[in-house]
Image (cartoon, rainbow, N blue to C red):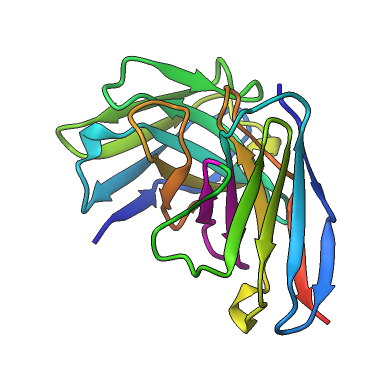
Amino acid sequence: QVQLVESGGGVVQPGRSLRLSCAASGFTFSNYGMHWVRQAPGKGLEWVAAIWYDGNMEYYGDSVKGRFTISRNNSRNTLYLQMNSLRAEDTAVYYCAKSKGKYALDAFDIWGQGTMVTVSS
Amino acid sequence: DIQMTQSPSSLSASLGDRVTITCRASQSVTNYLHWFQQKPGKAPKLLIYAASSLQSGVPSRFSGSGSGTDFTLSISSLQPEDFATYYCHQSYTTPHTFGQGTKLEIK
């Protein structure tokens, strides 16, 4: 069964850090690009970051550039999102999503269930 | 950044109706345009990719068309499980961007 399972969310104070993980199963993780997408409460979808199948290229949305880092461990079938200098506006459900292809230009065909991140003092 | 504008923002329809949602890009995305369905508290689900290709397992009442800047998602005969929010998404360039969503409600 093709599956993505996020973990690592929680409540964190502004300025602090958090690392999200996304465990993949049921497909050859190392063959596909991966993404993080977030959704603030009651709002629409916002693309956060992407990484190539081999980890050689990363892309970021303007609102997180310089603060967030996407990475992957293909031997562990796991995607990560390191979030530093968190702000209240980063509060959202964070989804990991699988690309249909190796790079960052394809549709997202598999999504995790999401993990909630709340930034609050 | 490429702006994606969906219309309408909300739509009321009855079971069995045919509905169409449009998505306009601020510049050409060729066919790198995809449609998702999202139900409350759930992750988005891919319906249509590359403007007009039906994702595996998605009912054939869903269809997509368009290229360049103007796209449509159509549902031929609304079923109870189709009432949800729909998003378009461009992957032509980073940053990827989404439309603001169209909420489809039962009339």
Quarter of the rendering containing residue B16: bottom right
Quarter of the rendering containing residue A104: top left
Figure quadrant of the C terminus of chain A = top right
Q: Residue at x 64, y 48 (%)?
A: B65
In front of the other: B28 or B107 = B28
Total numbered badges shown on the rendered structure: 0
Figure quadrant of the N terminus of chain A = bottom left
In front of the other: B62 or A76 = B62
Whole-percent x, y for residue A20 in the image: 41, 40
Which residue lies most toward the left here?
A75
Quarter of the rendering containing residue B98: top right
Asked if the magenta segment contains residue B102, the reply would be no
State whether residue B28 appears in this view: yes
Looking at the image, residue B95 lies above or below residue B72: above
Asked if the magenta segment contains residue B40, the reply would be yes
Whole-percent x, y for residue B14 in the image: 78, 82
Q: Which residues are magenta?
A: B34-50
In front of the other: B32 or A83 = B32
Q: Residue at x 75, y 56 (%)?
A: B21
Whole-percent x, y for residue A65 in the image: 58, 18
Whole-percent x, y for residue A70 in the image: 41, 26
